[in-house]
Each structure stands twice: as structure tokens, then as C-alpha cells.
Amino acid sequence: MSVDVEALAATLDGAAREAAAIAPLTAAEPFDLATAYAVQRALVGRRTRRGERLAGVKMGFTSRAKMAQMGVDDVIWGLLTDAMAAEGSVDVSGLIHPRIEPEIAYLIGREVRSVSEVEAAVTGVAVGYEVLDSRYRDFKFTLPDVIADNASAARFGVGPWHAPRDVSNVGLLMEIDGRTAQTGSSAAILGDPARSLRAAARLALGAGIVLEPGWVVLAGAATAAVPLPKDAHVRVTGAGLGSVEVTT
């Protein structure tokens, strides 16, 4: 393909930095998934050259229903940086159309060089959240578009870490300003978030990325994402995992 990967990455980067929505990239020139991931890497590369550090991996399309909706048979993934980590607050004025979803998070304790060792490398599990912010107008995109856009990654947060345990069916509650916004179970994440963890290792290693000590893996959404308004207080609670809170 003749797609200019760096130019597309620059377009997405500019949209994020200026909080200005753009038309899907594929509307001008379609490209395949391999090209989409090349754009994603170039996009994240622009961030790391500005001084950000890689901090983990986020998984997307981890519900069978979402896979069917998008016509795919595998999850997608993106990269997290330290600048995406929310310290208890998120300035939504710097985002385009933020949405939030409850997550199960894994803490990586040592380098992961094969899929078979990723579960043993986990030193903590926690309840978390991810703030999504597609750079595309009206949150509408094709599969290559969302992959290129780093799987809509924007911000994330995690609660207190707990010793590794079975998190295959953790009840999750997300409240906004004290009102229930979503309820669900971690079982919605590929039937067991551990499957998503293994997929994260498989996809990262396939791209030549080694999961590093201290990295976070966000296993994917346990419920649908909901709009994240300004001046809001959000709390995500996981049964047996405590809670994490964020204000906007």
C-alpha cells in the first residue's frame, strides 16, 4: 500500500493534542490491519519521543458481541503510556468525547518473553477503569481506523493491587455521582480476563514488544462504556478488589 504511515500518525496525534475530531482516516484512503498497527506504533512513537514512557497494554473488543458487531474474530490492542495514567482526576476539557468503562487490571512483575509465562509473571490484580476518547467524529470508525487510533486509549486508573487470584467472575459496579451507571461481571471479558491477558502477551510479542516489570495490562471492558461528563465523580468497585475513584 502507498499509505503514508507517519502522516496518518501525525494527523491522529494532532487531533488528540488539539482535542479536535477528524474524519476516519480510511474515508480518504482505505488500509489494512497491518498498516493500521504500523500507524499505531508511529503514533505512540511520537508520544515517547516527547518523553512519555510505555506503561502497559490495553485490550479491546474483548466481548464476543463486540467482535461480532465489528466482524472480527480476534481482540485488538493498544499501548499505554505513563502520561495516560490518571492520578485520581481527568481533565475532560482536553478530550473530545470521553467515555469510561470498568476494567480488570493486571500488574506485570517480570519480563514476559512467552505467552506461557505471562500468568506466572503477574504480581497483582486490581479493579480499574479506562477512559476512551476516539479521535474520530461522532465516535464512528472502521476496524483499521480504531486500531490506528491506538484503540481509542486516553486515560486509565487502577485501584489497590491485590495478590494474584481468580478474577474470572468478579462483580463490577460503576457509579457516577452516586448513581449506578453500569453493572456487570468480569466474565464478560472473553469469559475470563486471563484469556485477555494471554492475548495481550501473544499480540505484544508478535509485534516485538516484551511486557516489562511494572507494566499494566487492562484486560478489557466488563460493560459498555458510558459518556464521562465534566464535574463528575466516578467510582468503580469490584467484589473482593475494593474500588477506584476518579473526578473530572
Image: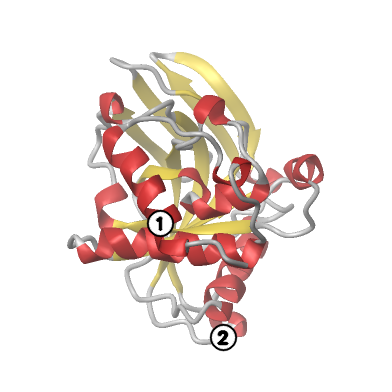
Residue appearing at x 41%, y 40% in the figure: 242
Q: Quadrant of residue 107?
A: bottom left
**Residue 140 coordinates in the image, percent (x, y):** 60, 32
Under tag 1, what secondary structure? helix
Give the residue pinned by disc 1.
7
Above/below status of 41 relative to 222: below
Q: Is residue 88 visible?
A: yes
- Residue 216 seen in the current view: no
Question: In the image, residue 188 lies at what x, y percent?
Answer: 70, 44
Q: Position of residue 199 (x, y in %)?
A: 63, 67
Q: Position of residue 85 (x, y in %)?
A: 29, 48
Q: Quadrant of the C terminus?
A: top left
Q: Earlier in the sequence, mark 1 or mark 2?
A: 1
Q: Residues within 10 Å of mark 2 (few under 14, many from 20)?
A: some
Marking on residue 114: 2
Spatial CA span between label 1 and label 2: 33 Å
Name the residue located 61 percent from the left edge and 50 percent from the top edge: 29
Q: Residue at x 74, y 52 (%)?
A: 191
Picture disc at residue 120: none
Single out the residue that lies furthest toward the bottom.
113
Amino acid type, label 2? Ser
Q: Quadrant of the N terminus?
A: bottom right
Which residue reaches farthest left?
Answer: 51
Rendering quarter of residue 111: bottom left
Query: Is 180 placed above or below 205 here?
Result: above
Residue 12 or residue 177, whichever sits in front: 12
From the viewer's perspective, is 22 left or right of 76? left
**Image: 145 above or below 165:** above
Task: Give me the residue at 55% from left, 30% from top.
Answer: 139
Query: Nearest the camera: 124 or 128?
Result: 128
